[in-house]
Amino acid sequence: MNDMFEQAGAVAAKIVDRWSWWQNALRGNFGPIHSEPQQGYYRVRGKDGQWEPVAIWLDDGGAWLAYRSGREVRDVEHLWTFACRFPIEHAIYEKAMAGGGFDDEPPAPIGDNSGDIDPFEALRIEYLGEKEQAEEFMKQPVKTQAQADKVAIWSKRLTAIKTKAEGLHKVEKQPHLDAGRAVDDKWRELKSDPDDLAKQLKAHIKPFLQEQIRAEEERQRKAREEAAKLREAAEEKARRAAAETGNTEAEDAATASEAATLARRAEQLEQEAEARKVNAGRTGARVSMRTVKVGVVTDYSKAAAALVAMKHKTLIETIDTLAQRAATAGLPFDGMEIREEEKVV
């Protein structure tokens, strides 16, 4: 009888011992990990990044058996190398096998794996599924580590969608970019070279037009001077005629006529003294000199200070960008400081 009890105790101890490694691992006490599997419940990542439940045990015949998401796995040792670091409780295993997933894992992404759907639509369906589930999740605050882990995994999945979208966008857009560049190359010479040549011609004629302007200014000066002389002569003749006495009526009339003629001539010269446009060409195809306003910075510090005082949007955005680059490099400059802020990444 005692032998029977001893044999039964040995069998029970052996059964308990089969689970001991897994039970200790659940408490964070991982024993030596060898190629030989250890009986228990675990999980591994699938190709889609989702956790899959794993069960490993030794059958009565001494052979190792393993199931992954309910599918038998032939190479138990290979599966063990991936699962050994991720033990889970039996209740968690059962919940996952029943389709309840894992508490620290977002729901499986929604998508179409048929291969017949357009990649854009497939990725959009996946994103909208993630968006709907994430927005529902965010209606409640995060209170557990499992929920926090779920957020981290969710963020990674969303980033993966973004990365995939960038790749698909580039692939789809590249032929259009190449075609656009080909069109640009075809028309570049006729778009830019004629304008460049026209500018060269205008630069070539500039000295001539400048000389014409100087000649025109000289003509205006002489006309004004001659008009002033004639105006003065007419006024002088009119004064003399008024001051002289004893002249006949005919003599007074002649003097008045001469003064009037001088005054008219002076008026004509004054009109001629008005500026005339200096140009070349014909209507619709003229070139001329024009005075334009050109801003020249004489003191960059004062100019920058003035623009900041005016809250110039573009300058302020540029300064903010440079300040962020300086903060990233750890090299602050005068007028800024580096502050540390907590950010979820």
Image (cartoon, rainbow, N blue to C red):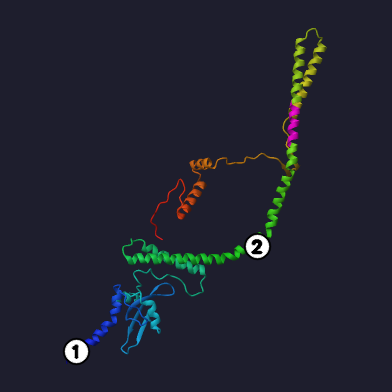
Mark in front: 2 vs 1: 1
Where is mark 2, residue-wise? Answer: 182
Where is mark 1, residue-wise? Answer: 5
Segment colored magenta: 213-224
Left or right: 224 as drawn, with respect to 294: right
Instruction: Choose between 254 and 269: the one closer to the eye.
Output: 269
Left or right: 89 as drawn, with respect to 244: left
Above/below status of 243 relative to 265:
above
Position of the N terminus, as image quadrant, is bottom left
Please tell me how crowded label 1 is: few (under 14), some (14-19), or many (20+) other residues with Cα within 10 Å.
few
Where does the image place residue 73, in percent across and percent down from the top left? 39, 83
Residue positioned most to the top: 246
Residue positioned most to the left: 1
Most frequent secondary structure within the magenta stretch: helix
At a point 24% along the width and 85% down the height, the residue shown is 12
Where does the image place residue 29, in percent across and percent down from the top left? 30, 74
Position of the C terminus, as image quadrant, is bottom left
